[in-house]
Image: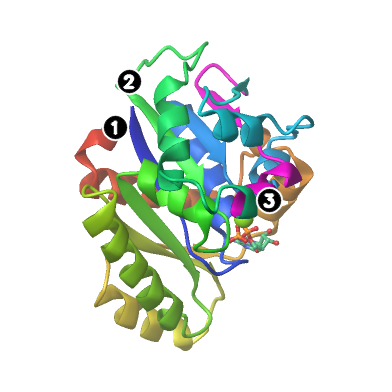
Amino acid sequence: MHVLAIGNQKGGVAKTTSAAALGVILSRRGKAVHLIDMDPQANLSEAFGVEDGEGLLFQALRQRGPLPVVRLSDTLTLTPSSIDLARAETEFLGEPGREYMLKTCLEKTELPGHVPANGDVVVIIDCPPSLAVLATNCLTATEALLVPMKAGGFELRAVGHLTDVVRLLKERVNPGLRIVGVVLTEAKKRRAITPQVIEEVGRLYPVLGVIPEDAELVYATTGGTTLKLKRSTALEEYRKVVDKLGEELAWLNVK
Ligand code: ADP
Ligand code: MG
């Protein structure tokens, strides 16, 4: 099992959309993929038309038990989220070892129906837009962090702050953690600012892709039909992101 988290404490930068797209692409290439929705807003769950009506993810974290798993296809499964998860931010605040809840649960989780046709199970975590308890759990459970950010403006301050947090977590809880790269999202055509952002971000991290604005991807993710998405300019670009990720992460083992 190998883990990739999609995170940025800023909201609306396409974390969830990227997690959904990467999950679908990898699973279509025959990888066994497990998605984890760690945002109480449950947008990733919605993208696949799934609900955690009973707050099972929150209960699993509280009990340090196995995560709930929903099968989406032969090679794709999902741990859905719900608004109950928001309680985690306050309820677990004073608990010793609170950073390790998700990691512990994940280690106990069996992923049924998964036949790893092409290597190990790849776990993709969609992080919440914060740097609090839930986000820290995501960054403790993962080996790599992919950072989506908007291509339309200067978002470097947020990435700088994220870099500091990742450095601290690496020192104190997760020595293997690394920021694997950045994906610039919702890039508008003919916007002079994009090349400038690419250059500035590129000095900090590999820029693994520039995703164009694309209505098809939005319809599919917001309409719960991501699994069926076929033609999409953004999805094409996410395919290239998967290839570049494969160059950075040997374990991803993409064909
Ligand atoms: P986050 O998870 O970081 O909050 P989302 O994935 O929910 O971000 O995306 C924020 C908004 O941007 C959503 O309304 C989403 O549909 C939209 N969006 C994401 N990617 C694209 C894209 N490539 N083209 C157009 N809209 C997009
Ligand atoms: Mg989101």
Pointer 1 and pointer 2: residues touching (CB < 8 Å)?
yes
Give the foreground label among 2 and 3: 3
Q: Amino acid at mark 1?
A: Lys
Give the quadrant of the C terminus.
Answer: top left
Locate residue 132 relative to residue 230 in the image: left or right. Answer: left
Tell me, yes or no, if residue 160 can be seen here.
Answer: yes
Q: Residue at x 37, y 47 (%)?
A: 140
Mark 2 or 3, nearer chain start: 3
Locate residue 110 relative to residue 69 in the image: left or right. Answer: left
Give the quadrant of the N terminus.
Answer: top left
Give the foreground label among 1 and 2: 2
Q: Residue at x 53, y 51 (%)?
A: 134
Q: Which residue is mark 2?
A: 118
Report the span colored magenta: 72-89
Q: Which residue is mark 1?
A: 255
Residue 186 rendering spot, x and y as whole percentages = 57, 68
Distance from disc 2 to disc 3, alpha carbons, whole Å, reads 35 Å
Q: Residue at x 24, y 44 (%)?
A: 249
Q: Nearer the viewer, residue 217 or 139?
A: 139
